[in-house]
Every structure is written in C-alpha cells, then in structure tokens.
Image (spheres, grey):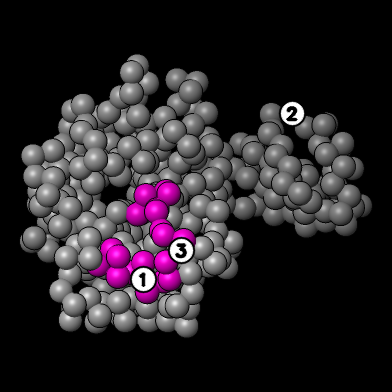
Amino acid sequence: MNPETAAIQFNDLRRSYGVAPALAGLSLDVFKGEIVGLIGPDGAGKSTAMRIACALIKPDSGMAVIAGFDPVTQPQRVKEHIGYMPQRFSLYPDLSVIENLRFFADLYAIPDGKRIQQEQRLLEFSRLEPFKNRRAGQLSGGMKQKLALSCTLIHAPDILLLDEPTTGVDPVSRQEFWTILRELAQSDKALLVSTPYMDEAELCDRIVLMHQGATLAAGPPDRIPELFPRKLIEIISADIEEVIDRLKQITNIEIHRIGGKLRIVHNDPKLLEQLRELLNDLELTIHSVPPSIEETLIYLMQHEQAA
C-alpha cells in the first residue's frame, strides 16, 4: 500500500435497512499514523460504516477501499490487513489471558515462533503481563477491553477498526486505553474508532459527526466548535436557583443547567456586561466560554431536524 494513499477510503457510502437510512453518503479518508473518530449517538451509522469496511455487509451504493482492496469483491484481502473490534468482542471467560491470545493466534494460523514473540509483545504493550494467567472472566472491564484489543492485534494488522471500544469502561481505564491507541497510531497504524463519548472525540486527529446516517461535520476536533453560530456564557454559583430566577428578566437566551453551572446561549455582544450588573450581589463566577464538541453536535442535530 502506497503510504501516500489512504488506508481507509469511503466514497459516498449509502446503506439502508428497509426505509431507514443507516448511512446517507459517508465519505472520508484515514491515513496511517492517525486516529479518525466517528462520533454520534446510537443509530448514527457508526457500526454500519465499520461493518462495510470489514466486508461483513455490503453498501447499497458508493464504495469502500481498505488497504487498496474492495471489501465487496476482495473480502479476504481486506481481512488480511484489518483488526476489527466490535462492540461485543467475544473473549472466552474460562480461558486465561494468554490462552485467549493463543486461541486467536491459532485462528490466524500464526507459526509458533512468531506467535510466542507476538504474545509477549502484546502482553507488555497492553500492560497485561502481570495478569497473563488470570481467567478473562475475572478481569475488570478495562482489562477485558485491553485483552480484546490485544486479540485484535495478534496478526499484526496495519488497520484497526474499533467500534465503541470503551463503552462501559471506567474513566481511568478509558484514559489508559486511549494512551495505547495513540501509541498504535504512532507505530504507523491507521485507526478508525467510533465512540459516543465527547471527551474521546478530542483525542482523535480528525472526527466525523454523524446523526441518523448523515454526516453533519468533519475535521480536526478543535475546529468543529467553529460551526456553532452563537455565543456562550458560563455561570457557576452555589445559589443557582436565584440566578435562574433573575435570568427570567432577559429574553432571547437559552439556559442549560449542568449541576451547579449554567450555560447561556445568546447572540447579544452586551449580554455579559448586563449579566454582571444583574447578578453583582451574588457570589459567582461568570465568563464567556467556547462551545464544546457536544454542544456543536446537538446544535447541528437540531438544525438538521428543523431543516
């Protein structure tokens, strides 16, 4: 595969289940050395895109090219190059960590000498070496996902397709998992990762925001909030109910409560000064803030539905 050619190419992929569109024209490129994230709620089309790339289902129209091969006409060649981790990866709970790795190595007919070397490398890489003799069913959620990723890597694929790999994993384990993903990208692998978590979106090199099969936006995570057309003010106060009561005097704003914080959506360049005067006798902090990826996604979803 030419290093200048995208490892994963989607060109106007479309797929429907009955009358419901699962993908409505997805186009993207993923190059070696980068992590691209598919971001969106359930039903956005993330898993459908993954399954097309893995040659598990066919698109209704459009084309995917994986490692230079067509999943529709050359599925076996595609599978030689990819590691696919579905949402429900089937580990064998009664087998130990090392036995699970050995099982998947046997599936790929990896010779013993290479298998032993690869197993050791993956145990060290995934930080599972101290637990190699523990049964998979006795591992924590985060460790199970590390083992699933290691099994996905056993045949040394250069392309990884990871479908919501950290769902249900605690925050610390998610952070450790993403450290491993970044190390994989730095070792010149191409990673396509789907996630519903907005904090994980920020860890990708590029993201695609999806909703009901449609692509809402695509680009580097730090550029996506530029698509949010309004301004935001954040208020933090111990007396949030009093703040909300006083804000009823102001029109043409949206108020979103997040615990002890308020996010105010507006278009008034003088609003910050007005709010400081209105709330000056209360103990609080108030300042303008940039929109988040999540707020941008919600706005784009609402705008799409209104259109």
| 96 in relation to 249, above or below | below
Q: Which tag, 3 or 1, sits closer to the chain's start?
A: 3
Q: Looking at the picture, which amino acid does disc 2 mark?
A: Thr
Task: Label 2, secondary structure: give it.
Answer: loop
Instruction: Classify residue 84 by image quadrant.
Output: bottom left
Residue 11 showing in the rendered view: yes
Query: In the rendered view, would you say 289 is above or below 55?
Result: below
Drawn side of residue 20 relative to residue 283, left or right: left
| Number of numbered labels in the structure image | 3
Residue matched to label 1: 99
Residue 94's disc number:
3
- Give how far apart the Cα atoms at labels 3 and 1 are: 9 Å
Would you call the spot at circle 2 few (<14 residues within 10 Å), some (14-19), or many (20 or more)? few
- Give the residue type at disc 1: Glu
Element at label 3: loop
The C terminus, quarter of image: top left
Q: Is residue 96 left or right of residue 262?
A: left
**In which image quadrant can residue 190 be found?**
bottom left
Q: Does 100 appear in magenta?
A: yes
Mark 1 element type: helix
Q: What segment is highlighted magenta in the picture? A: 85-105
Left or right of 57 in this view: 241: right
Q: Which mark is residue 251?
A: 2
Q: Residue at x 26, y 58 (%)?
A: 83
Q: Position of residue 251 (x, y in %)?
A: 74, 28
In what quadrant of the picture does the N terminus appear? bottom left
Q: Earlier in the sequence, mark 2 or mark 1?
A: 1
